Amino acid sequence: MPIPLTASMLSVLQRTLLLTLFTPALVLLTLSAVPALTVLPFFACGTDRALRILGAHTGYAKTLLQYSQGEASASRQPRNAHPAVPARRPPTRRRSNP
């Protein structure tokens, strides 16, 4: 006798499947960045690049964990916002004194 699947059971199954598929990709991405993170701080401007890499990985991990919790937590961040790219402020105008 088959077990009927409800909407909540399907959403849990979907979240579990997505987390199962994307976690190894995130781990592989993080492991591939380890050599760069160990060498970059010794180069000029390398610390800034290493921090950007770490920020991107943190954003990807937060997104994966946030969206694996369901629609209630997905509404916290706008869909068009990318977690690894900080929002830019518009340039300020300098006032010229006549």
Image (tube, rainbow, N blue to C red):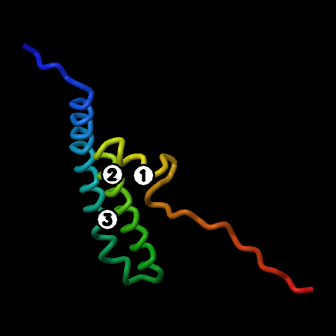
Q: Which mark is residue 66?
A: 2
Q: Which mark is residue 33?
A: 3
Q: Quadrant of the N terminus?
A: top left
Q: Amino acid at mark 1?
A: Arg
Residue at 27% x, 34% y is: 11
Assess disc 3: are there few (<14), some (14-19) or many (≥20) residues with their C-alpha within 10 Å of its C-alpha.
Answer: some
The front one of 46 and 6 is 6
Give me the residue at 45% from left, 77% from top. 48
Q: Are marks 1 and 2 in contact (CB under 8 Å)?
A: yes
From the image, which quarter does the C terminus lie in?
A: bottom right
Going by the numbered disc 3, the residue's amino acid type is Ala
For image coordinates 40% across by 62% down, the residue present is 56
**90 relative to 71 in the view: left or right:** right
Badge 3 vs badge 2, beta-carbon distance below 8 Å? no
Out of 22 and 67, give the one closest to the viewer: 67
Give the residue furthest to the top: 1
Q: Is residue 51 above or below residue 80?
A: below
Q: Which mark is residue 86?
A: none
Mark 3 vs 2, N-terminal side: 3
Towards the viewer: 15 or 39: 15
Label 3 vs label 2, nearer the camera = 2
User: Is residue 49 rendered to the left or right of residue 62?
Assistant: right
Query: At which x and y percent is residue 52?
Result: 43, 69
Q: CA distance from mark 1 to mark 3?
A: 29 Å
Q: Give the spatial CA distance, label 3 vs label 2.
A: 23 Å
Q: CA distance from mark 1 to mark 2?
A: 9 Å
Residue 36 image offset from top left, x and y in percent:
34, 70
Kind of element beneath mark 2: helix
Q: For mark 1, what is the residue?
A: 76
Q: Position of residue 42 (x, y in %)?
A: 37, 84
User: Does dot 1 land on a helix, a strand or a loop?
Assistant: loop
Report the label total: 3
